[in-house]
Image (spheres, rainbow, N blue to C red):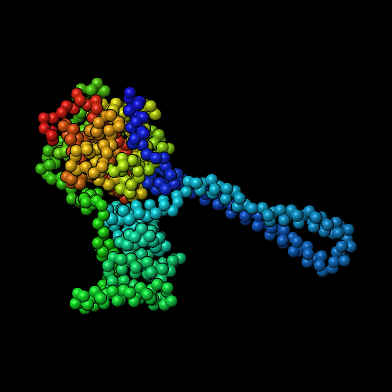
Amino acid sequence: MRKSVFFICWTLLSCCWSTQAEIFTSIGQMTDLIYTEKELVQSLREYIKAEEFKLAAVKSWANKLDALTRVSTSDPEGYLAHPVNAYKLMKRLNTEWSELESLVLQNPAEEFISNMSIHRQFFPDEEDQTGAAKALMRLQDTYQLDSEAFSRGKLPGMHSNALLTVDDCFDMGKTAYNDADYYHAVLWMQQSLKQLDAGEEAEVSKADILDYLSYSVYQMGDLPRAIELTRRLVAIEPSHQRAGGNLRYYERLLFKQLNEQNQTYQPPSEEPIQLGTYSRPQDHLPEREAYEALCRGEGLQMTEARRSRLSCRYQDGKGNPRLLLKPMKEEDEWDSPHIVRYLDVLSHEEIEKIKELAKPRLARATVRDPKTGILTTANYRVSKSAWLEGEDDPVVDRVNLRIQDITGLTVDTAELLQVANYGVGGQYEPHYDFSRRPFDTNLQKDEPDAFKRLGTGNRVATFLNYMSDVEAGGATVFPDFGAAIRPRKGTAVFWYNLFKSGEGDYRTRHAACPVLVGSKWVSNKWIHERGQEFRRRCGLTEVD
């Protein structure tokens, strides 16, 4: 029975296997690309060495024959009068020139090209590059970082030599532009222009940057600045195929607006465009501002009164034999809803084993489409995940049993241990872990009961293991009540998603903040209702 439940969970909840468009979502797998690139550099050096050896041999031949032909052509008959010279001429033309021809025809690049072809199947593609660019923009928004900060490697708490060139910034802006994201297109084209004006060398021309920038500024509704930028473009390239027409259109449009509003023309601000010049367009997420503020460490609702109600203790699982001699260290993270953190849950060796098991299976994490019930990838969940069974390794079985001992809840009906790795800008926007019921007023129309086929009930609780420290970002936040929980390697947090009545606790809507610096590894166990009847009894009211 247990095996069949695991199998159904796997079928319903597992991810599709990795495709090339998903590399950027996992730092764990991207490290392989680092070593791949190192191997290719070594292969390239071997190719250069082979070409140099070949060229040196050809040069040696040329030098030797150049000296020889100077002598032979000075007196051809006298030269050939000597029988050895006649023989050597026949030999050279019959044999040695053929050998030289073979040497010249040798292609040392074949081995390098072959090596490239082998590795190319694992290379990121255009979609990966676009995803990585969007990840930087996501970090830019969440942590309110201007383009200059990224371009110069100035991130909170660190400074590195990871710099973006004029062309890099232009490509970032172009990615946003092609996605009709003119807000970010403006920020990155402006940064590209700024660095170009500062004298930095680039392949892209100023005219190209101004072309994209002026139109993006127009799309943001800033006609005076769009006109000023387009005039700069026309001054640089008078024959530009669009600039003249755009300029006349912008000027007519501005004149019309000023007439309708009975206003006079005001020249555009001389201040450079930067973060805050334009408002970021609203998106699908109602709590976007609160969520991102918590990720930055702002808006926390941890008052002194609330903090005074929190405590720490040793927890033995209500007399569990396996915890009597070594009880767990339990700390309150929040009072209501009650969220606790357990210390020293996983050892370094256990974490490394779990990562080792998960890494070959990592695939782009999926979410369940609320209308179709089908698992699919989504921009609001950017990570890679794998699912591990207890039978995969004794470590997994031991961790599952430990979770059962700590929580007092059976894991027989729980889902498999899910391991996730968040890479560049990896995140999971606000969501519920539990499935909302058909009669729930918060439920979208036609949203199916995601766990009905499992026959194990809803997700009653979440046990989340942090398997790495994160240098910056990556917090677990709860926008409803203003809590932020920072990852600490080896610890775990636990909370109930449902009240004792079985009703969903909507306060537990939570999110994984984008990883700003570092790699975030987590594993979680979603514990279901069935089997908990005598372990967590029903309450007397709906919200007990």
State the image coordinates of residue 459 (x, y, percent, origin top left): 25, 34
Q: Quadrant of residue 104?
A: bottom right
Q: Residue at x 87, y 62 (%)?
A: 80
Q: Is there any visible trace of residue 460 in the rendered image?
A: yes
> At 33% from the left edge and 66% from the top edge, which residue is drawn?
216
In the rendered image, the vertical position of residue 266 relative to residue 191, given as above or below: below
Quarter of the picture holding the N terminus? top left
Determine the image quadrant of residue 72: bottom right
- Seen at 33% across and 36% down, the residue is 13
Residue 171, position as x, y percentages in the image:
40, 60
Q: Quadrant of the C terminus?
A: top left
Residue 316 percent coordinates (x, y): 21, 26
**What x and y, as percent, mark residue 492?**
26, 36
Query: Which quadrant would residue 399 be assigned to in this image?
Result: top left
Residue 400 in the figure: left or right of residue 37 = left
* 144 shown above or below 411: below
Q: Residue furthest front?
A: 446
Judge by depth and name the residue closer to the eye, 31 or 314: 31
Taking 152 as reference, is 142 left or right?
left
Residue 276 versus residue 239 in the image, above or below: above
Q: Residue at x 37, y 69 (%)?
A: 210
